[in-house]
Image (cartoon, rainbow, N blue to C red):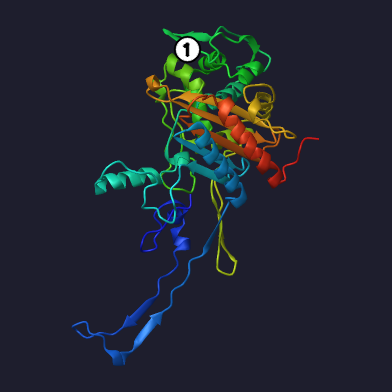
Amino acid sequence: MLGFTGSDNQGILGLEVIYDEYLAGTAGKILTLTDASGVEIEAAGERRQEPENGDNLVVSLNYTIQKYVQQAAETVMEEKQADAVSIILMDPQNGEILAMANVPEYNLNDPYTLNFEAEGELSEEENTELLNQMWRNPSINDTYEPGSIFKIITTAAALEEDLVSLDESFYCPGYKLVEDRKIRCHKTAGHGSETFTEAIMNSCNPVFIELGLRLGASTFYDYFEQFGLLEKTGVDLPGEASTIMHAEDAIGQVELATVSFGQSFQITPLQLITTVSSLINGGTRITPHFGVRVEDADGEVVETFSYEEEEEIVSGETSETLQYLLEKVVSEGTGKNGAVEGYSVGGKTATSQTLPRSENKYISSFLAFAPADDPQVIGLVVIYNPQGTYYGGTIAAPVMQEIFEDVLPYLGVEMMP
């Protein structure tokens, strides 16, 4: 996130480039008089313009929390022999990012050295391409299929349209036929009879396919726009990627079915956690950010940053219902491994398969927030291509549990009575 500067001290990447105008300062100068041939005229003397330091940027990153998150990311990547791990922690009420870790990392003090051994001799062009890949921040620069965490968005839209009630009964035989496709549930034997509350606890695909079909492409698309999914988050880092979504007129019944449970489109981890934050915080769309204010060398505030918010993207009632449902997911459903003793935690698990499907590579993730009925911190763990067991509830949820066990007491979040 911090980024680095070039040889001329100009910001090149990360916060260094976004806030360069505040951080750079003014270079010093020595002004002298020369003759026509460029020889300095000593008798004329010289005039100095002293350099001025830049201001200081105060950011929302918390050093202690960042250490917890960084350590957790490195540990699970090694244990699961994963390709990469991204973890984000933020305040869902105002969008302040408390921690963001992406591993493997590179050395900010030596940013032009690759963080892996390249095979053979590299051309200058190849080396530059590898450096650009190494400098990417997967949390904001890269997109992925979010899987079942997206069911939170589907639920919010269905609740807003009054298309489902919590005690409505469904039946899952292990699949749902949509046109000529048999789209399977992760539990191939089926969940049988279940209420909607049980369906979200079970992360049952056929039930969410039904909700997507009830919504229809046009209405569902309207909610994508209303929730802010089709715009960039506006985070204060360079190179944010946009959501890759079907065009509205290209969403047929099959596409509608797969989108409803988080597949066949792509989103950044930051967009996902920002959208869910906005749905469970009472309905205010927030702007995720690092920059808080700028101070001069004496600690005097030069500028305090403000960020755009959009109120009532969902009703307060829908937001409270989501809090209730997602607490059930953690206390009794697929997110049990993310529960933290003494705290009410809401969350959602996800396991998605990368393209091409034939390679059998998976992305395991878990989103959680606490307290469930008054969210003060929200986190997202994304594990890319873990080896062995790959279910989000099995390997990603325990990572967030461990982080929350450290972070919740540290932040002073009150325990349940």
The quadrant of the rendering that contains the C terminus is top right
Q: Is residue 231 above or below residue 326?
A: below
Q: Nearer the viewer, residue 4 or 209?
A: 4
What is the number of callouts on the image? 1
Quick one: 337 or 327, which is closer to the camera? 337
Q: Is residue 317 left or right of residue 5?
A: right
Q: In front: 338, or 322?
A: 338
Left or right: residue 241 compared with residue 283: left
Name the outermost residue toward the left: 37
Q: Which residue is mark 1?
A: 183
Residue occupying image coordinates x 30% and y 41%:
119
- Asked whether the viewer can see residue 355, the reply is yes
Identity of the residue furthest to the bottom in this view: 43
Residue 179 locus on image (x, y percent): 43, 8
Q: Look at the picture and state if 389 lies above or below 277.
A: above
- Image spot of residue 31 (x, y percent): 34, 81
- The quadrant in which residue 151 appears is top right
Image location (x, y in percent) of residue 10? 39, 60
Image quadrant assignment for residue 397: top right
Task: Give the residue type that dot 1 points to.
Answer: Ile
Residue 345 coordinates in the image, percent (x, y) = 68, 32
* Residue at the image position 64 percent from the left and 34 percent from the top: 401
Residue at (48% x, 69% y) in the render: 53
Is residue 242 shown above or below 262? below
Nearer the observer, 5 or 221? 5
Instruction: Provide the secondary structure element on which disc 1 rests.
Output: strand
